[in-house]
């Protein structure tokens, strides 16, 4: 669909700014709402002079602002959220408040406007489930309330429940996309807690790469360009309404192998050291041993398949870090 006016919340962030680039390139008018707590103006600085781009700095908790912006657009990509394990563990109350109340404010405004909303969710919603690969209809397994990291997963699940409740009760067209470990240029380790960004940063600084736990936990890493394509497909596909989709690369790699790959690409002389989870995040921290998506629903309904392998995306990411390390 061409020539729409689209709102991207969190559009100054890593994924959001790449989404903005793609939407503008497709001929849309784009408004970004971001509080810049994590996002950076530099991420969209190359777009500020374009006539079809507008930036509003503000919070998802500002009800009048959210209502005004949603009231003037045709559809909404909702990516604004508090993300990153470090931030969630340190301040779970803030994370839940922003993620849930912000989403509720957005959906309430969208219901008045009757515009479609694509909600960015996360592979974290599967929690500690061992039913791998993860399917969208599977049960989630969340940890104890004594482990604050699961508050993020719970907030994203509640966001999805809110979105689909608005779909069922208010006929608001909504869809959710569950991202699996996005990486690529503009990735910021301070904002997202990305292990790829952490390893690259450590390697470029000449420091040992620090692996939490035994390093045999696995993850599936998805290049940001694929993440953006899947997100846009969820918006442009009418059949996506009322459904959640895994947007990820169905290939898993151990964190040890990832560390070795990045170390060898930057400086093979560097050490790799292992740190207990408790030392990094506290005694109550819990983690998932595997996180692998089943992408058959996205392939069938959205015609989406991740195209960029780690061997291609990782060098692009390392190069970007090198160019922006000063």
Image (spheres, rainbow, N blue to C red):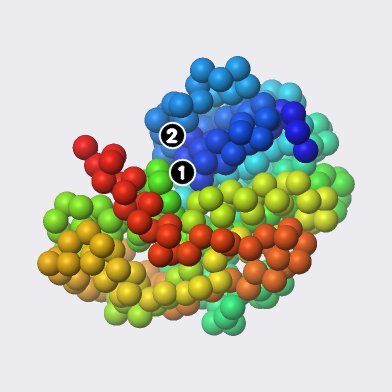
Question: What residue sits right under mark 1 in the picture?
Answer: 14
Asked if residue 133 is positioned above or below residue 235 in the image, the reply reads below
Residue shown at 74%/29% (left/top)? 3
* Disc 2 to disc 1: CB gap under 8 Å: yes
77 or 148: nearer the viewer: 77
282 or 164: nearer the viewer: 164
Asked if residue 318 is positioned above or below residue 65 in the image, the reply reads below
Residue shown at 51%/38% (left/top)? 17
- Residue 156 visible, this angle: no
Q: Secondary structure at mark 1?
A: helix
**Disc 1 packing (10 Å; few <14; some 14–19; many ≥20):** many
> As drawn, is 106 to the left or to the right of 96?
right
Question: What residue sits right under mark 2 in the picture?
Answer: 43
Q: In whole angstroms, how far apart are the C-alphas of marks 2 and 1? A: 7 Å
Mark positioned earlier in the residue sequence (2 or 1): 1
- Residue 229 visible, this angle: yes
Residue shown at 61%/33% (left/top)? 25
Residue shown at 30%/68% (left/top)? 261
Q: Quadrant of residue 79?
A: top right
Q: Secondary structure at mark 2?
A: helix
The percent coordinates of residue 129 (x first, y second) are 55, 78
For the image shown, how many numbered marks are present on the structure? 2
């Amino acid at each position: 669909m061409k020539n729409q006016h689209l709102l991207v919340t969190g559009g100054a962030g890593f994924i959001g700014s790449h989404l903005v680039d793609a939407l503008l390139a497709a001929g849309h008018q784009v408004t970004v709402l971001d509080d810049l707590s994590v996002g950076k103006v530099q991420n969209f600085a190359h777009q500020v002079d374009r006539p079809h781009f507008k930036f509003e700095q503000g919070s998802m908790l500002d009800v009048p602002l959210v209502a005004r912006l949603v009231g003037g657009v045709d559809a909404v990509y909702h990516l604004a959220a508090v993300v990153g394990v470090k931030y969630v563990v340190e301040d779970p109350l803030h994370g839940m408040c922003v993620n849930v109340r912000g989403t509720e404010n957005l959906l309430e405004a969208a219901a008045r406007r009757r515009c479609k909303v694509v909600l960015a969710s996360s592979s974290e919603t599967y929690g500690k489930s061992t039913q791998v690969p993860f399917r969208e209809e599977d049960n989630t397994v969340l940890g104890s309330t004594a482990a604050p990291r699961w508050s993020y997963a719970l907030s994203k699940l509640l966001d999805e429940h809110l979105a689909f409740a608005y779909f069922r009760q208010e006929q608001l067209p909504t869809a959710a996309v569950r991202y699996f470990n996005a990486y690529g240029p503009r990735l910021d380790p301070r904002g997202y807690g990305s292990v790829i960004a952490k390893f690259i940063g450590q390697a470029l600084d000449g420091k040992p790469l620090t692996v939490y736990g035994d390093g045999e936990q696995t993850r599936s890493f998805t290049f940001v360009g694929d993440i953006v394509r899947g997100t846009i497909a969820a918006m442009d596909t009418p059949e996506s309404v009322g459904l959640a989709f895994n947007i990820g690369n169905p290939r898993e790699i151990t964190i040890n192998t990832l560390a070795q790959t990045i170390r060898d690409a930057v400086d093979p002389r560097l050490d790799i050291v292992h740190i207990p989870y408790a030392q990094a995040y506290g005694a109550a921290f819990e983690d998932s041993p595997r996180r692998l998506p089943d992408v058959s629903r996205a392939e069938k309904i959205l015609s989406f398949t991740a195209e960029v392998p780690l061997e291609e995306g990782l060098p692009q990411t390392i190069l970007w870090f090198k160019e922006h390390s000063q």
